[in-house]
Amino acid sequence: MSGAADWKRSLRLLWGAHFLSTASLTAIAPFLPMYMEEMGGKEDALLWSGLALAVPALSYALTAPLWGKLGDRIGRKWMVVRASIGIAAVLAAMGFAQTPAQLLALRLLQGVLGGVVDAGVAFAGGAAPENERGKALGKLEGAVAAGSLAGPLIIGLFWGTIGFRTLLLLFGGLLMVWSVAAAIGLKESGEMREQVRERASHPASVPVVLRRLLADRRCGVFLMAGICANIGAYGLLSVFAPHVNQLAGDASGAAVWLGILQGVTWAASWAAASWWGKRNDSVPVERNFAIAAAVCGVAVMLQAAVVSPEWLIPLRLLQGFGFSALLQSVYLVVVRTSGADNRGASIGSASSLLVTGQIAGPLMGGLLAAWFSPAFVFVQFGAVFVFSAFLVLVQARVALHSPARATASETGLASSPIQRGK
């Protein structure tokens, strides 16, 4: 009973860490240009803010596997605490930044020291009961969606009253307090601690772990599909605002609609994430991913055809509903593929690969938007989502018809109560 109670408390602490770190970081992005102007970068505010938005992903992609490997050696609890403290310290330092160059350096450091989500997923992948891992990852995905919804809303409400610098310090302080709570409250089982001691003498290098992930056909396909999902989602960033502005007809109306549409998208993701997670414990993950990606793709493509902002609301709801299933499904497959001795390094390596989609998506979107209409770009990125569903379905079909690989675990049927005889 104590083990179950420890896990429930740990899951609540992980949820809070995911929520606070995501809320604080997503709150920064929309207001970076204005903050850059406050620090004297008026002429080059857009250039500085663009660089500041890009560099965390680059430094994070390089360091995430290394932090994951360290977590395999010393314990994943301490990676959650480390990443939370790292983000808290960077946020507080941002509140004291005086120049755009200082803020850029801190954003670079943010990518190096962060990784709360990775650390939480790795912890949950080992601590959650095997038949509830999907449920656990679904709850953590919901925390990310809730943070993405709350962060910009909090900044928008309080920017004019207490200022951006004070808000950064408050976010940093809250996350630091939560880091202390995680250090005290997160509990790794005796079996997990024993595995840490064993792993310390037999560490696997990051390249070896990455090769193992990619050598597994099922895991490799899911990682490729996850990259495509990130390309589709982040590629829309460059065209969504101009599209809404064109539909609204004026800048002030477009700003209101952008806030509403972002809100309903993340609200739908928050509401649906746990539902998808539970389904992943009882239904083949391939089926869930394919359905969700197809829903996402169709919703994105239909956004090209609307004639007023109101019609975007149901389509953004569908997009958020579908997208909430995608990355958590990829991580679940990585957790199931990896062993207890390299789960942290596996999650970190997978995250590093998935970040390439976050980097490539806006670049592709910007290039396409320069040559084609926003409607055309929506259709193209919707097709990327559909392609990711196609990849997963083809892999599942090949696995089912291949005697050497058609095992229950590779087709996702190991998660089904029927297949386990329950």
Image (cartoon, rainbow, N blue to C red):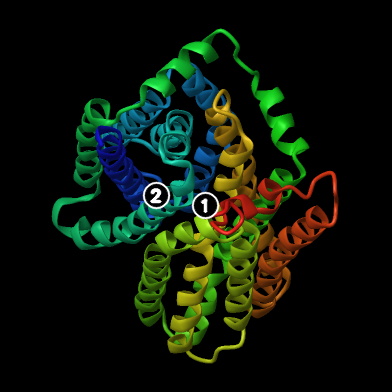
Which secondary structure, mark 1?
A: helix
- Identify whether 377 is placed above or below 91: below
Horizontal side, residue 141 vs residue 350: left or right? left
Q: Please give the residue where the numbered disc 1 appears in the rendered image.
A: 328
Q: Which mark is residue 140?
A: 2
Residue ranking furthest to the front: 421
- Earlier along the polypeptide chain: callout 1 or callout 2? 2
Pick whichever, 101 or 59, lies toward us. Answer: 59
- Identify whether 260 is placed above or below 394: below
Residue type marked 2: Leu
Residue ranking furthest to the bottom: 307
- Identify whether 371 is placed above or below 332: below
Horizontal side, residue 389 vs residue 340: left or right? right
**x 54%, y 32%: residue:** 59
- Identify whether 389 is placed above or below 413: below
* Mark 1 vs 2: CB contact within 8 A: yes
Query: Residue 316: image x %, image y %?
Result: 48, 75
**x 64%, y 50%: residue:** 357
Query: Residue 115: image x %, image y %?
Result: 45, 35
Query: Is any atom of residue 145 visible in this view?
Result: yes
Q: Distance between the residues labelled 1 and 2?
A: 9 Å
**x 37%, y 82%: residue:** 253
